[in-house]
Image (spheres, helix red, strand yellow):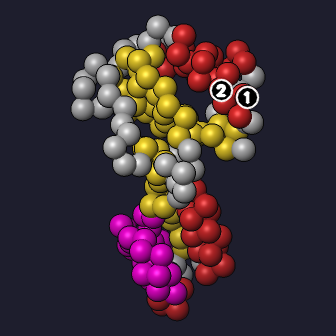
Amino acid sequence: MRRVISILLENEAGALSRVVGLFSQRGYNIDSLTVAPTDDPTLSRCTILTTGDADEAEQITKQLHKLVCVYRVSALEEETEGGIEREMILVKVSTPNRNVRDEVKSLADIFKAEIIDVNAEIFTLQYVGTSEQTDNFIQTLCKLAEVVEVVRSGVLGIAKGTHYMRG
């Protein structure tokens, strides 16, 4: 089962390396990794998407808590249970003729994607949604046009409601 783990860690050299090293040492795979500074310049927020059962997820969080550079760890549950996940993708598609361009524009409207760069041969689109929605968007787009390039941000996650992580 997919697991989203959110970590507040020190914003300093080597901190991310220690977190990733823990996953490597334990043989856990990282499917996506997103890291950025928080509103506190001394802390970064790291969101990791991994797979495993409940016991493995618990083991990972326990091991993460032991790292010196880690302040807080939270395993986010699926959106229906209390977590919100989003992923951003940038997609370049070939638009060799007016018909393809019109179909891509219509699809962008339906999915509420944004066309962020246009020239005579290529459209670049931006889409934000859950991982499942982004997969669906790409699959649908592939049926209309040749997808030239896809860039994914990786999963971002935050708890619903009044639950939050601060240093």
Q: Nearer the viewer, residue 58 or 14?
A: 58
Per the model, the C-alpha gap separating discs 2 and 1 is 5 Å
Residue 75 picture location, percent across and down: 55, 35
Is the C-beta separation of discs 2 and 1 under 8 Å? yes
Q: Which residue is mark 1?
A: 55
Q: Residues within 10 Å of mark 2 (few under 14, many from 20)?
A: few
| Quarter of the picture holding the N terminus | top right
In the rendered image, the vertical position of residue 6 relative to residue 141, given as above or below: above
Q: Which residue is mark 2?
A: 58
- Residue type, label 1: Asp
Q: Secondary structure at mark 1?
A: helix
Residue extending furthest bottom? 99
The residue shown at (45%, 64%) is 127
Residue 78 picture location, percent across and down: 57, 50
Residue 119 lies within the magenta run: yes
Report the magenta residues as a range.
Answer: 103-127
